[in-house]
Each structure stands twice: as structure tokens, then as C-alpha cells.
Amino acid sequence: MLEPVNVSLESLNLMTLAPMLIPIVGALLILVVDLFKSNIDKSLYVMLSILFLFTDFMALAGSSSAFMQNGTLLGLFDVMLVDGLAIVSQFIIVVASMLFIPLALTSKRFHEFSYPEFFALFLFMIAGFQFMVATDNLILIFVGLETASLSLYTLIAMHNREKSFEAAVKYFTMGALAAGFYSFGSMIFYAVTGSVEINQIATVLVANGFSDIGFVMVGFAFILASFAFKLSLVPFHTWAPDVYEGSSAAMAGYMSIVPKIAAFIVAMRFFEFLIHSGLVWVEAILYVFVVVTMTAANLWALVQTDVKRMLAYSSISHAGFAMAAVMIGTTQANTALLLYWVLFTFTNLGSFSMLWISRQKKMLPGQNSDHSYEKFAGLVQSSPMAATIMALFMLSLAGVPPFALFWGKMYLISAAVTSGYTVLALIMALNSAIAGYYYLKLIVYMFMKDPVDSRYEKVIGSNLSLSLKTIIGIAAVGTIFAFIAVDPLLQAIGGFVYNSGY
Amino acid sequence: MEHIITANPYFGVFVLFVLTFGAFTATTIIARLASRALAAKDTEKIKLSVYECGPEVTKQPNRLSPQFYLFALLFLLFDVEIVFMFPWAVDFKVLGWFGFTEMILFIILLAIGFVYAWKKGALEWHNIK
Amino acid sequence: MEIGLNHYLVLATILFGIGLYGVMRRKNLLMLFFATEILLNSVNIGFAAISHYYADLTGQMFAFFVIAIAASEVAVGLGLLIVWYKRHNSIDLDEMSVMRG
Amino acid sequence: MEKYLYIALFAPLVSSLFSALFTAQKKKQFVGVIASLLIFTAFASSTVLLVHILNGGEPIHVTLMTWMATGGLNIPFGFVVDEVSVVMMMVVTLVSTVVHIYSNGYMDHDKSFNRFFAWLSAFVFSMMVLVMSDNYAGLFIGWEGVGLCSWGLIGFWYNKESATWAANEAFIMNRIADLGMLIGLFLVYWNTGTLQYEEAFAAFPGLDHATLVWIGIFLFIGAMGKSAQFPLHTWLADAMEGPTPVSALIHAATMVTAGVYLVIRSHPLYDLIPNVGLFIASLGAFVAIFAASMALVNRDMKRIIAYSTLSQLGYMFAAAGLGAYWVALFHLMAHAFFKALLFLGAGNVMHAMHDELDPFKMGALKEKMKWTWIMMTIASFALAGVFPLAGFYSKDAILEVGFVEHHYIIYTVLLVTAGLTAFYSFRLVALIFHGEDRYTLFGIHPHEAYKFMLWAMSPLLILAIIAGAFQHTFFELVEEALNAVHYHIHSHVTLWIMIIGTQAFVLASIFYAYKKYARKGIKVPDGTSETEQSFLYKLLYNQYYIPYFYDEYFVKPYRELSSIFWKKVDLKVVDATVDGIAKVLYSTGSATRGMQSGNLSTMLRWMVVGLVVLLMIAVAVGLAARYSAELSQFLAGLGV
């Protein structure tokens, strides 16, 4: 007869779970509140979401101090793994979410924000991402990934436009395929090693000296395919431009940041032990992915006529850029990736918010995309402030010193150089140069062309409200004064990454 | 003891069955492929419609109410959760109080979802929101 | 002949291939969802078999979660599909290409 | 002393930020005044620093902050005021003070008056960062900063199509060159582990020759872009679309000389690789004559001056390439004074002529614009290198360098160019100020510029006259920093023959230009009126066809050659290459964008294709590993 299991509460280490539970509880609370009293103003939900995210932030701060004292924490039958990577990435996720959610408080009314479900799903999604980064169990990664993705599909569809449904269906279908890839890949690793925990898999594989290299490579191929989808690496990127175009600018900006950092963390956990075990093929494949993604996405961005699609391709290119860090796999590179993403968060937050403030309810006659370049032509004449701020974000994206992303690029390239990837560093520099061209194109439109249509003047900024102004202000300050924060940030992130062994 | 399959009196019938099945499948496929290859490809829109002349074809109204799908979805979602309860029920004694508490939490979560669906009117046939 | 692990894995792979083929060829959104279900369930077969082979329950757990996730995926997918169908009266993929380039 | 360094550096920044506050508002006079005062403060501090250095004070070195200190990368961000940078600081702050004050008058009627000062001061700040930085990283930041500001200033009148086009051309062409520079900096960092000048220079002798050559070449590519050297020179002439004070400050005195500054700064590097130096010198000489030849045929006042700037930059590179860094720096300084003066004078003329640029439509302006005439004439004399003006000393020194170093071809080319320079400068002066007034035909009533603008120009005038006298002081100043040596021609006879010969040649050119263009009866060339058609008139007009003969057999082929240079080499080859690269990138983008068909099925197939490719690699790797023993046997059998 089996003895009943006895689990003491301390051994569960529920504290590791707290940061994820908080948004879940928040989401449930929002749903329940809505059940008993509907038609509450959306600003309350926004405030509630921010409140829960802030609590989440405090819980994370608690975890981080615990980490600094005791090192990596395990919890819930060793399924939860709270190490430096998990903490830093959760900070990025939560802070980015806090900055994005006020974008719901627009001056125009939008369909989706009147539903409390929007905010509930948003919080569920955050919890999903947090689960994804705070574990090395493939099951939990899968559950987190799908929780987040399913919520995200719904959030996109809630924008309630022709294009957003199309975007949601496309994203959903491709996401389902990627989920299939992921589960099949996990199955192969399970078959080869008998475990679904990444560190166990690593131990077993290293112990038997990668004797089943063929199977390992097949599994790697599947897992890589699924994460390449999430990270929008070419040729798995095809969803990105359409989904960005179809969803609201705020959502698109969010998508360019948070899901990707979660995917980067998992990719780091999974691919780096393979690379460090000396599998040159893994490295070679990733190398090709990085180079192709950076270059091809840049070339496509050049020929876009819509600013949002251009930013979509630019985000793909940036993802390729950051993926280089995963491939290099040194502590310096991983630190640089996280720093890059922090800076990218501010810049992209700003540039997508600038698109968001110029969102129209209805398109003008003769207009066939929401944010065409023409819309911004001669912006400097009607609102020089908006044009300058937009130009600031574009310059930062292009990597012009001393704005935020310059530092990210700088550290990433220098990490590549220190690890001996000189050619890669050159390719990265070259790509930054190409990228400069299409960012500049928007600046040229704003500053040097005459307005195409005077009706656009009214449109730009029509969606502006105090909270949007605040967010754009934060983004602008973050972008301009990044150089002050870079060094301390780097110290902090470097400490976290180093102490968790990456 | 040796089983010789061929010794079975019905073996002939089985072979015949298999052959017939194979031939049938093969003919179908070949016919399909041949017709696809040989047919004149005229994909004019009118030609593809049901009647080339006469009244315009009206789409069949969707015979199933959307409510039906909603019910199906809800059923699916709640039904699938059984897979988590079943193993728990099997090992109920071994899992003890800890398992019990966990399952109760799980069911509470489900219940919130259920109440939500209910309150939203998803369970009422004629009251679609 | 003993039916061993390999047979199950081959079965899983074949099913996966069928699913993949369906994903590529089907133009009907509903059929596409079926194909993705086949993908996910082929993995379940594999997990169950491997789990039995190692006498380790982790694989079965994974399979349970895959089932649950597949179900929620169907729920979301069908929801999207119904909305799409209501608006367009069609679930043909080829009509879904407003955005391009 | 550090206090003055900070004032000199940050006063322009304060000025820029202050002016930027008012960019959205309409013209406010006090913005211009305060900006000018702040820039003047920077100038005063620079003067204090110069005096300090002149009195034998130690170079001032401050480390502002450490902005990168992780991994192997450690870049302290510091500034240095030594003999070289203090000269540059003086040039930059002096000219920019003059230009700021002058702009108060010049931009008087412009609605974007405040924005102009914001950009202009931002430019000065970037330029100060560029010249004062003690490391390549800071230099690069200043370098990009001046590029950005120059973009904003060339395209200042952004509603003019040509201005925006010129701004972009300048920016893009500079970006291309900056890429070369960036590679150069990477190589420096990669090989020496530092970007600090001192440490890097100390490490250079230990590197192998090929690496140094590559570093030298890539850094020089950056310099070529900024200083508009062939084949990246086209932007400079087009950049004349900007307001004239901008041309005076950026495209004559400061930014375009940044390339020369880079070469001078990196002199320990170029000393080690004399072959690259020789290449630089040859290119400089070529550019000198090439640009001068283009100036001969042009009919646009500002473009003529721009080509002459180009030509003078060629002189500087020729000197620097031959190792005479101090001569290059001296010419840089002298040139800044008289060229800025020339440009500002041209600005006065433009103002008077309501933005007319064709000198053939002017004439006889000396009566109306006496002071402008005097200033431009003296500046042109200085540019032509007539004794005893500033240009004489610096240009003569360059010629002597060529002679003493036995590079007679370079010497000859530069000598010929000196003649050409004299000719086109005075062609311009003669057409504008002498002869008879042709502007009345166009209903223009010219007037002299504001008094204070003329006063503002006066320091430049004085310096253009007397700067040559400081040659000795200057030599002593930079002697140690640049390993300066005197280039003496030992034989006195040769020396005097050279000087007198050159002077005679130059004066002859001036005289010829004056003769040809200052006479009465110069028409705006159109060649249609009836009188022009009559035989007698034609005969007289063409001076019995003797000039025609000369023209046909000497001038015309030459002019054709010039215009071939301009049209074919310049527009076709160079522009086409630049455009071509952009086009290739662009068309690759549009050709492959079909991948994004928008069709979900296609997208899914792309995913599967990606997976299948990955799987094929995986299976190949697996099989190779599985059968590695057999494979190696097989390969051994093949003799691999």
C-alpha cells in the first residue's frame, strides 16, 4: 500500500509562484467585478491592472532580493525556477506591460477597451509569459506559452476591424502549427533523455556524449522552428507584418517587445547548452538565421509604404540582431541582449505610441493603410513637437548616438567582437547602416515634404489624451537619457545573468 | 502449434476482399487524376455556379444557430478538464489532503469560469449577447 | 511481432506528417484546425508510448496538458472562425489576404 | 584652466538648448543675441586656453565620465586641450562667433530664425566635441553630430525640393564614408584594445604593417566623406542650397576640415605608413586641380566658392599626406579665415541681389557695396596667395613642401592650381563688382548689408590680412605636438625664383581674369539678340576671333574636359555608383517581398519549408555522425 504523500507548505516555496499568481488573481477579480456590476468606466480597469502589475512588481522585487541572498530558487516540486534571467525578464515584462496598459486611455472610444475581458486577458497573458520565463520544465513552458498566446490572439481580434480578424486568424493558425512543432520537439527530447527539464536534458545528453546526435538535431530543429516563429526569424516571420498591421498600434508595440523577450529567455535556456557543448551545427544554423533575419527584414522594410509595417519589419530585424546574442552565448552577450531589450522597450513604446495617437476611426477616402508615410508628410509644419519626438524615436531605432538603442547595439556588437565573431559584428554594423535609410525616410517625410492632404493634420494627435502624453513623455525621456542609465543597468543585469550561470 | 494462414478456408475471400479494395481505391484515384488532367480547364465563374441560368442561387441559411457552437465550445472546455481529475480520483488516497486541496482550488477556478459563462448568458438558448 | 516503442513513434511521426500535409494543403479553415489537432494528438501518442517505455509518468502528464491546450486552442480557434464566417460567409483561406507585401 | 575648457565646450550646448526652446515660435531677436553672446563666451574661453598653451602651459586633460566599462571595453570619455585642438577650437569658435552675429542680420526676415540658431549652436557644440575629444569614440560622436546638424542646416529651407535633396545627399554620402571610419575604429580597438589617442598611438608601432595600412585607409575613407574628397565630393557643391552663413561656417571653415583634422590627429599612424600618406597627398593634389577646373566654368557664385573650398582642402591633404602636418593645419586655419570671409561677402551680395547667384547678372556692385567689395577682394587675394596676405604664407609653404620632398609632379599640379585659383577668384570678383551694372536689367536695387554685419566680418578681414605673420609663432606652438620641421629650400636663388615665379604667375592670372571679365559690355550670356547676330558685332565681340581661336583650340577642349569631368565622372560614374547601391538594395527588397503574399496557406508553407530545411540538415548531421567511421574511410580512399 502506498503511503499518502505528505507535502509541507514550506517545501513548495510558494513565494516563487507569487509573481504569477498576482496577475491571475487580478484577472479573476476583474471578471468577477464585471459580473456583479457591469458598465464600469474603463479607466477603473486600467487602474486595477496597473495596481496588480505594481503588486506583481513588488513581489518580483522580493524574489530578486531573495535571489541575491540565496541564489537560484526552486519551488513547487522544483518546477518553478527563479534565477537571474527569470527575474530580469519578468521585470522587463511587467514594466513594459505597466507602460503599455495606459495606452488604453485614449481620447477616442475603442471597442475593445470597453470590455473588462480585455484587461483580464491582458493580465492572464502576462502571467503566461511569466510562467514561461520562470521555469525550465518544458510542460510549464508550453502551458505558459499557450496561455499567453491564446490570450494574445483574442486581444488582437478584439480590436474589431476587418484586418484585425484576419490578423488574429493568421496568427492563431500559424501559432497552432508552432505549438505542434514545440510539442513534437519536446517529445523527441523526452524520448532521447527521458526528462522534460532542460537542465536534466542537458545533463543526460552531456553524460552520454550526444550519442544520439541525429535525434538531438531533429528535436532541436523542431524547437528552433517553434521559437523562430515566436521570435519572428525569417522564414518563420511571415505573420509579423500582417499581425502588426491588423492589430492596434498599442498592441503591435506590445507584441514587438514582451512575447519576444519571453521567447528569448527560453531560447537562451535551451540553445546555449547545446552551443556550449560544442555542437557546431547548432551554432552554424543559428548564425544563418541571425544573418538572414537581420538582412532580409531590413531589405523588406526599405520597400514598405506603411509606417507600421515598416516598424514590423524593423522589429523583425531587431529580433535577428538580438538573436545574435543567444548564438554567441557568453555572459556578456546575454547581458547585452537584456540591456538591448530594455532600451528597445522604451524606443518602440514611443514609436508605436506615436502611431497610436494618430489612429483614425475611419479611413479617409483614398487612404488605403492606417499609417502611410503620406500621413506624416510635412508633420513638422502642423505639429513640430510631434515630428521632433517621432524623429527622436526613429534616430534611436537607427542607432544614432547618444540615443537609447545606440548603446544596445554598441554592447551587442562589442560582445560579438570580444567573442571573436568579427564578421558577424561587421554584418551587424552594415545592417544598422542599411536600417538608417528607412528610418530616415520617415524623418524626411516629416521634415522635408509638404503635407499631402490637409485633412491628415486633424487626424494626427486626435487620439491624444493625458495618459498617452505621459507615456510618450516617459518613452522620450528614457530614449534621450538612456546614457545615464546604461551603466548601472548593465551592472545590475550583468550581476543577475552571471549569478544564474548564463 | 503452427498457424498457417493460408490453410484457413476463408483466406481466399480475404485476398479477394483486399484486391477488390485495392482495385477500387486505385480506380478512384486514377479516374480522378485522369479527369483532372484531361478536363478542359474553364473556370469561368458562371460555369462554376450551380445553375448557368435562371434564378440566382441563394446561400442556404446556416441551419445551426451560433448558440449551438457556443454550447459545444463550453462543453469541450469543461469536459477536457476531466483529464486532470481522473488521475487524481484514481490516486485519491495516495495524494491525500494535499491533492484534495489542490483539486478543490482547481474546481473553484473552473467554477468561476462557469459562473462567468452563465452570467454572460452563454447558457441560455435564446438570449445571445 | 512485438509492438515496441519504435512502432508508436513511427505512428506518431506518420500522423504528424499527415497533420503537416493537411496544414499545408487545406484551404478550408475548419479543416486546417482539424489538421492542427492531428498534429497535437500525434504527439500525445508519442508521449504516452515513451512514458510507458521509461515507466515514467512525466510523459503522460505532458500528454494531458497537450490535450487541455488543444481543447482551449479549438475553443479560441472556433470562436475566431465563427466571427469570420459571420462576416464573410466563407472560411476559405484564399479570401483572407487583404494585407500583403 | 579646466573651467575654461568646460565653458568653451558647453556654452554652445546651452545656446542650442536655449534657442531650441523657441523653435516653435516666431522670430525673437533676443534668441539670436543670446546665442551669439554664448558662442562669444566659448570663443573668449578658447582664447584664454590658447594663451595658456602659448605660454608653455601643460595640455589640459579632463575625464568627464566613464561611459563604458564592462567586459573588455573601457572607454573613459574625456577632453583634451593641447596644441592641436586649441588651434581648431580657436578657428571654430572665432568663425562661429562671426557667423552667429552675421546671421542675426542675414536671417532677419526668416520665419524660422530661432530654429536656425538652435541648429547652428548645436553644430558648434558637436564640432567642439569633435576637436576636443581625447579619444576616437568622442571624435566619432562629434563627427556624427556635425553630420546631423549639417543635414538640418543644408535642408533648413525644407520646403525647397533641392534643399532637402542636397541635405539627404550630404547625409547619405557621409554615412557611407562613416561606415569606413567605423570599420577603422573597430580595427583600432580590435588591435590595440583602446580608443584613447595616446594609448592607441603608443600601441601602433607594435602592429604589423598591413593592419596599419588598413586602419589608415579606413580612417581616411571617413575623412574623405567629411572633407568631400574625390570621389565623395559631389555633396559639397550641392550643399550650397543651405543658408549662406551655414556655408561659411560648415562648408568652408569647420566641418569639411574635420577630415584634415582627423589625418593630422592621427599623424603618428600616418607617419608609420608613408605609402598611404603619398596616396593621400596625390589624391589631394588631384582634387585641388580637379575642383579648380570645375570652378572655371561655373556660373553660380556659391558653387564657385564651394569648388574653391574643395580645391583648398586638396591642398591641405596634399600637405598632410606628405607629412607636413603643421603646414596643413596652418593652411586650414588661414583658409578658414579668408574663405569664411569670402562666403559671408557672397552672402551680402546675395542679399543685395535678392538671392540671385549668377555673377553675369551682377556687375559694378563696387559702388553700391563698397565694403563688401573690399572684403571680398582682399579675401580673394588671400585665396590666390598674393603676398603678404595669409594665403601666401600657407600656400607657399605647401608648395615648398612638395618641392623639398621631391614630389615634383604634386608640386607642378599645385602650382598650376594656384594659377587657376587666382583666375576663377578674380573672374568672380570682376563679374560681381566691376564692369557695368547688369542687374538693372532685372530690376534689382542692391544695397549694402547692415553695418553690424560688416563689423562682424571685420575680424576675419584682419586675420585674412595678417594671419601670415603668425607663421613662426604657430610653428613653435605645434612644433612638438606634430614633429614639425621647417621645409627650407637651401639655395636662396631657387627659393626666390620660386616665390617670385609663383607670384608672377598668380598675378598674371589675376590680371587676365580682370581683363577678361571686368570690361564693359559683358552680357548675360544668351546669344540671341539681333545685334549679337550681325557679323561686325560678332567679329568685335569675339575680338576678331583670336580669342575664338584660343577658345576653340585651348580653352574649349579644356572646358570640355572640365565639363566632362563634371558631367561624366562626377554625375555619371560617382553618382551612379552611389545610386546603384541603393537601387540594388531596394530592388532586392521589392523582388523578394512576394514572399509576403498575404495568403495564409503560403505563410504556413513557408513555416513548413523552414522546418523541413532544418530537418534535412539535422538528418544529414545525424547520418554523418552515425556513419562517420565509414565516411572517413571512404574519404581516405578518395585521398582527401
Image (cartoon, helix red, strand yellow):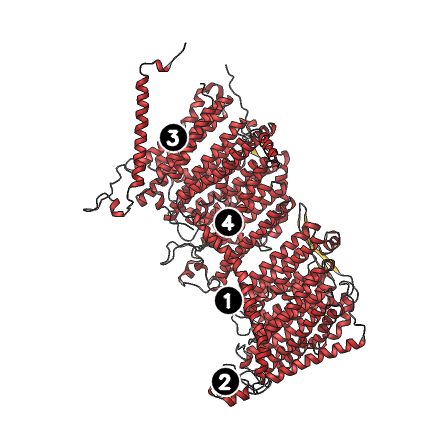
Instruction: Give neighbour class at mark 1: few <14, some 14-19, many 20+ (Cα, 10 Å).
Output: many
Residue D228 sits in quarter = bottom right
Name the residue nearer the viewer: B17 or C81.
B17
Q: What residue is rendered at 55% in x and 41% in y? A: A286
Placement of D625 over or under D343, stated as above or below: above
**Mark closest to the chain's N terminus, 1 or 2:** 1
- The answer to whether marks 2 and 4 mark residues whose Cβ atoms lie closer than 8 Å is no
Instruction: Tell me, yes or no, whether dots 1 and 2 are on the same chain.
Output: yes
Closest to the camera, between mark 3 and mark 1, is 1
Identity of the amino acid at label 1? Tyr
Name the residue nearer the viewer: A375 or A280.
A280
Instruction: Tell me, yes or no, whether dots 2 and 4 are on the same chain.
Output: no
- The answer to whether marks 2 and 3 mark residues whose Cβ atoms lie closer than 8 Å is no
Query: Which element type, helix, strand or loop, lies under badge 1?
Result: loop
Instruction: Give the label on residue D441, or none.
Output: 2
Identity of the amino acid at label 3? Phe
List the residue tagged with mark 4.
A296
Closest to the camera, between mark 1 and mark 2, is 2
Closest to the camera, between mark 4 and mark 1, is 4
Residue extending furthest toward the left: B54
- The answer to whether marks 4 and 3 mark residues whose Cβ atoms lie closer than 8 Å is no
Residue D446 sits in quarter = bottom right
Relative side of D118 to A251, left or right = right
* Structural distance between the alpha carbons of marks 4 and 3: 45 Å
* Structural distance between the alpha carbons of marks 2 and 3: 93 Å
Residue D484 image point, x, y percent: 77, 65
* Structural distance between the alpha carbons of marks 4 and 1: 32 Å
